[in-house]
Amino acid sequence: MEVLARKKRGMTVLYAIVGVITAALFTVSVTILPKSADPFVILLIGLFGVVCVGLCVKECVLSARTPDVILQTDGKTLYLPKGKQISVLAVQKVEYKRASARGFQYDYGKLMLITANGRYTFHYVDEVVEAHNALIALMMKLREEKTEKEE
């Protein structure tokens, strides 16, 4: 079987480290600021810290739950996580979105498969553009073979 999409390695560790640093900064700011700051400022910093740590935990869990091999194929069938299988010809559209921050675009991102039965979204896909292009090439190849058989 050919692997079309893999998970970007290190994302769980990255979000865990960012979460720990954010929690540490939040704790330091809340313990130092009460002596000199307005209570409203302390409340805002507290809310900001809780939201940031919450987002880091959410992303860390999402990254940890993403399997290492996201998308495999045997040439005619796509094997998705959790044992789901769909025909390559059933895929109507493939989209991707590269991760970006502060004007930089990274090589990983989100891959979306649209079929008549629903939409499948995969996060943290390594080399998402290459995975997208490989899937499009496979779809075109199978559609050409299908039209040749019909003629």
Image (spheres, rainbow, N blue to C red):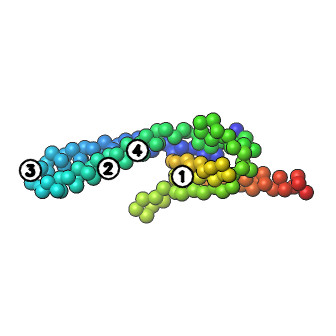
Q: Calculate the distance from the C-alpha at mark 3 to the C-alpha at mark 2.
A: 23 Å
Q: Calculate the distance from the C-alpha at mark 3 to the C-alpha at mark 4.
A: 32 Å
Depth-wise, is mark 1 or mark 2 nearer the camera? 2
Residue at label 4? 58
> How dense is the environment of label 1, judged by Cα within 10 Å: few (below 14), some, or many (20 and up)?
some
Q: Calculate the distance from the C-alpha at mark 1 to the C-alpha at mark 3.
A: 45 Å
**Disc on res. 35:** 3
Quarter the C terminus occupies = bottom right
Tell me where residue 97 sits by quadrant: bottom right
Quarter the N terminus occupies = top right
Q: Mark 3 or 2 closer to N-term?
A: 3
Badges 3 and 4: C-beta atoms under 8 Å apart? no
Q: Secondary structure at mark 2?
A: helix
Q: Calculate the distance from the C-alpha at mark 4 to the C-alpha at mark 1.
A: 16 Å
Q: Mark 2 or 4 closer to N-term?
A: 2
Depth-wise, is mark 3 or mark 2 nearer the camera? 2
Work out whether residue 126 can be spotted.
no
**Disc on res. 51:** 2
